[in-house]
Amino acid sequence: MSCIFCDIITRKIPAEILYENECALSILDINPIHYGHALIIPKRHHRDFLEVGTDELSGIMQAVHTVSHALVKAFKLEGFNFFANNGAVAGQSVFHFHIHVTPRYHNDNIRFVLHLKRYEMKAMEETAAIIRSAITDLSMPLMRSHT
Ligand code: 5GP
Ligand code: ZN
């Protein structure tokens, strides 16, 4: 299956490469929110964040950290965002996991349009309990493999 980001990683197609380490490549996004908007792309093909191996996480985040520092220094930024879209419903358009890092400026009128809710009655503690239980289920096989 063809993948534009795999083709960039293997240099089959060109990109403005900013940074590279063992796990990740960083390039300029072709349609930036602001000039300097960067992408950090794991070298291994993963559809989304859930597929990324735990052995790759620190390398990927180290690249995000380095590129964030560089953007702040290069453009004298007061702030920046980093984010990742996972799944079409969340706005993902390239299905090779990547993290966006983008400069932010005063009055740049970029807004994530949010309609914030309030938890009703016991919904907050119920929601937390559901998530904690899912985390326990996730860690079960890990704990078993350690014994
Ligand atoms: P997503 O929508 O999946 O979170 O982000 C995909 C990003 O990849 C978009 O911001 C888009 O502009 C960028 N993009 C898509 N194709 C290319 C390309 O060929 N080269 C570069 N540099 N960026 C790309
Ligand atoms: Zn890929």
Image (cartoon, grey):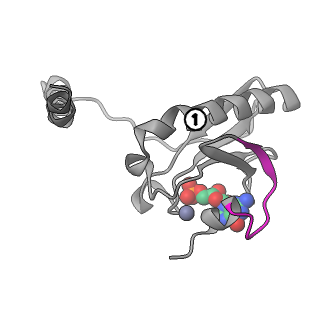
Residue placed at 70% from the left, 63% from the top? 8
Closer-to-camera residue (53/92): 53
Residue 15 within the magenta-colored segment of the rendering: yes
| Location of residue 137 in the rendering, given as x and y in whole percent from the top left corner | 14, 35
Residue 138 location, quadrant: top left
**Which quarter of the figure is the C terminus placed in?**
top left
Relative vertical location of residue 30 with respect to residue 28 in this rendering, above or below: below
**Which residue does the numbered mark 1 point to in the structure image?**
59
Residue 101 location, x and y as percent? 66, 40
- CB of mark 1 near ligand 2 (< 8 Å): no
Determine the secondary structure under disc 1: helix
Residue at position x 68%, y 31% from top? 80
Q: Quadrant of ligand 2?
A: bottom right
Q: Which residues are drawn in magenta?
A: 10-20
Identified at 61% across, 64% down, the residue is: 6
On the image, the x and y values in percent for residue 89 come to 40, 59
Q: Do we see residue 57 in this rendering?
A: yes
Question: Which residue appears at 50% of the width and 40% of the height?
Answer: 56
Residue 39, can we see it? no
Q: Nearer the viewer, residue 26 or 56?
A: 56
Residue 34: say if magenta.
Answer: no
Q: Amino acid at mark 1?
A: Gly
